[in-house]
Amino acid sequence: MISDRESYIDSLRGIAILLVVIFHYTYHYNSEYLLRNDDWSFELGKYGWSGVDIFFVISGYCIGMTIIRTKNFFEFMVRRFARLYPAYLTAGVLTLIFYYFFELPGREVDLYTGLMNLIFANFIPGLNYQYIDGIYWALIVEIKFYLFFGLLFFACKDLTKSIYLWFAICLIGNLILIIDAKSYIFLTSIFPHANLFLLGLLIYNLKKINLTFIIIVILFLIISLFIQERYEEFEIYFIFILFLVSFILQKKISLKIKFLSFIGLISYTWYLIHNAIGIIVIRELNNLDFQNVSIYAAITFTFILSVLIYNIIEIKSKSAIIDFYKSVRLKYNLE
């Protein structure tokens, strides 16, 4: 049962993942790559990429909510690991299996590269393995946020001060990104997405933030949209999206659509498997001249698969890891 607190968050997550899925299945790939015999695409699908950015805002908000109830940095990272890694490992292995049996030209990775992904070797500065699935870049950005902001928060032990300092980091990071995005890629890869985490944190802690600072952050966010290549030609649309998401989170507005909230619950797992596996399904069915149903089949197949992974792997593994951590902490009286 989803609580009212979780419902408004999961409803937004549901919208975000639907946007991303629509983007990849109807717009991102050209007809030739999808083995279609026409030039069909869904024009409104081009806005779907913004779903990832909505996830980042929600993530900032949720981290603000959870980090203040966490005892220390190690526990924080253990809980993040328990939340992310089991589903990531499962989705990564499944994607590698699909690569073995089917073709996805230019996007498959070999077994060694896949293994390096599964142990997060890309976190070692200087290593730059191709992602198992290109969309996994967002997961790496998320983890860097947990790492950097977690260290920041537990150093100052105050959420408001941490947000002020995170803003300073965002300001410096965005300037570095403009001047030289390639030399310090391990650090700069989190920008400009770090701005969205900042917005989520700000919304969660809004009542404790100085009004002047709120105005400065809003101006910073708007300016960043107009100077970052990622948002080119979508600036006004994205300002609207950020305002809408911020309003829903701040007012805790639940859309009261249970299925949408359920989609939000499994959105992380669906994100991990929908792209490579879903596009393989679409290509294979299109090749068999079933292009009228290929997108629906990919949505159905990857959705069911994500529900299974969520229930069988994600929930149980998360509970097992956290319970193990608690037992070790209790046994050795760790605080």
Image: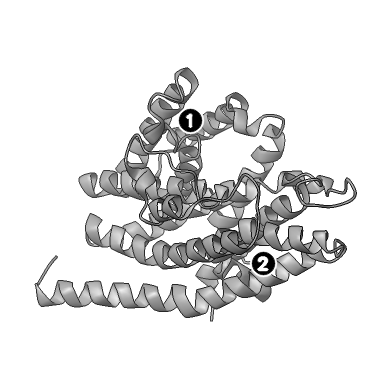
Which amino acid lies under the numbered mark 2 shown in the image of this protein? Leu
Residue 226 versus residue 328 in the image, above or below: above
Residue 328's spot in the image, x, y percent?
A: 17, 74
Residue 302's spot in the image, x, y percent?
A: 65, 68
Left or right side of 265 for 318:
left
Can residue 160 be seen at all in this image of the molecule?
Answer: no
Mark 1: give few (<14), some (14-19) or many (20+) Cα within 10 Å. few
Circle 2 — which element? Answer: loop
Q: Which mark is residue 255?
A: 2
Left or right side of 299 for 39:
right
Residue 182's spot in the image, x, y percent?
A: 44, 25
Residue 77 versus residue 106 in the image, above or below: below
Name the front one of labels 1 and 2. 2
Circle 1 — which element? Answer: helix
Q: Which residue is mark 1?
A: 216
In this view, the residue in front, 145 or 101, is: 101
Q: Quadrant of residue 129?
A: top left
Which amino acid lies under the numbered mark 1 shown in the image of this protein? Ile
